[in-house]
Amino acid sequence: MDHTISQPYSAPPEGHVSHSRLERVLRSGRFAITAELNPPDSADPADVYEAARPLGEVADAINATDASGANCHMSSIGISALLTRAGYSPVYQISCRDRNRIAIQGDVLGAAAMGVSNVLCLTGDGVGVGDQPGAKPVFDFDSLSLLRTIKTMRDERRFLSGRTIKNPPQLFLGAAENPCIPPYDWRPERLAKKVEAGAEYIQTNYIYDVPLFEKFMARVRDLGLDKKVYILAGVGPLASARAARWMRSNVPGIHVPDAVIDRMEKAEKPGKEGKKICIELIQQMREIAGVSGVHVMAYRKEHEVSAIIRESGVLASRKR
Amino acid sequence: MYRIRLFAIRHSRSFEWIYKRLESVMVALDPVLAKIGYDRVERPVAFVEKCVKTVLFDCKMCGQCVLSSTGMSCPMNCPKQLRNGPCGGVRPGGFCEVKPDMKCVWALAWDGASRMKGGAQIHTVLPPVERNLEGSSSWLRVSREKAAHLREAREKRRTAIADAFPDARANEPSAAPLAEEPAQAVKGSK
């Protein structure tokens, strides 16, 4: 049995809010790597561990998605609990679409008790894009009121009802941002609002439009936000020009510029080209002031994540 | 009504002015309303409020109106009912993820707020809607809340929400109410 789950409740290190490895890496100024796990349609823990293995080699934390795209898979809390048992550090994603405030606050305590130390607060895609469009959308919280609520639970030791929490959840609080979609001018302002609500790190959606992202980051630096929150830029390998076009028109909030699609189209081996673009993006992200790491979302290409990170050279300075 | 809603957002500055006037009248009326009994006026005022605001803003009578903090664009028209800004799914041109024919309520909100004097209120982090206040009058709540701004809260639960969202309490007190609610305004309390 692994000891992570039987560890006694203890205070986080000085100047930290949690025992999270991701928090330690970010606070120490190292370039952080997080990666998204493709959740299995299965009740077998082995399927989770198989998906986690290639990510765990390079990632400081593994994101367990919460029915992303409104498609049903193994739950994020289940995956997170399995990952902590095996010694991985998960990012427990919470979407506001499927659960109300009673369920979410309870799950936050449960997740923390199982050794989860990172959460990512998300609004969630609408039910209409998923595999069960007839489902009732909940949206009791939105991502910001959720952030503030978990912060209140952690720092003030109470539920939103005012009832006291004996031992509060020690969680590193994250949120998402999508810099490359409208309203562009307001995206940095919205980030400021998320920081105000309690976000300590940000994982962005896919970024394929570097100039647009640089413009966003310039405004973020003007607002002084890069000093208040760690930003991890979202990247991922494209499979083919067709897949990129499909994603652009069917998955909410994804912007792929025509130039990138053209490049994929002209490539002899699109798979290789997608990987190459991803590596280049990671190297470019590293050079942008205020970017503290990358978040790799390699949908159905998890096995390539480790190679992508190694080839990008961003971990070269790390003692491993 | 979509067109009228867009009109209201285009003229957010004027509506802000009207709302400010209305608010001071409501606050001034607090002693009178308290004397008549908030419980008694709740239904008729809510009815009038519903008629006016449905035409102007496609109001959904959430009971915790925050129009002054959302560029006069009612956030309850967002299919996800977000209270704190656009989600990550806004389509090119600023259209809604869920209803592609509709402009994103929050893209419009930022636009409306940019024309308003107190537009910076859009930065306020707002708490979730208290669903048991749906259908009740927000105008009366504003009157009670602003008037009772300094009155001590009796209920611990509600103090917690106001403490967790201090800016919201200061700028949009009816979003984090502290004053005593009349029975008529709260669902399921008789």
Image (tube, coloured by chain):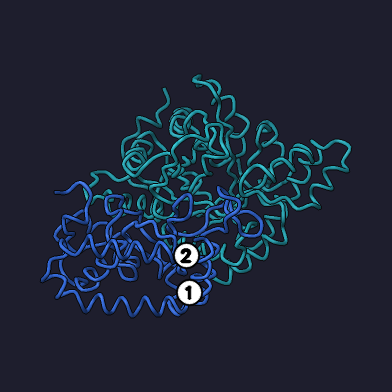
Label of residue B12 in the image = 1
Pick the front one: B178 or A174: B178
Three-letter amino acid code of the residue under disc 2: Ser
Query: In the figure, is residue A306 to the left or right of B58?
Result: right
> Disc 2 is attached to a residue of which chain?
B
Residue A260 image offset from top left, x and y in percent: 79, 49
Q: Are marks 1 and 2 in contact (CB under 8 Å)?
A: yes
A185 vs B44, left or right, is: right
What secondary structure is found at the residue carrying circle 1? helix
User: Which color was chain A given?
Assistant: cyan
- What residue lies at 63% left-to-right and 53% top-to-bottom? B91
Measured from the top left, where is residue A272 in percent x and y? 81, 37
Report the chain shown in blue. B
Quick one: SS at disc 2?
loop
CA neighbours of label 1 inside 10 A, class few (<14), some (14 to 19), many (20+): many
Determine if marks 1 and 2 fall on one subunit: yes
Please, is residue B74 above or below residue A133 in the view?
below
Name the mark on residue B73.
Answer: 2
What's the distance in space between the residues labelled 1 and 2, CA to CA?
A: 9 Å
Note whether residue A310 is visible.
Answer: no
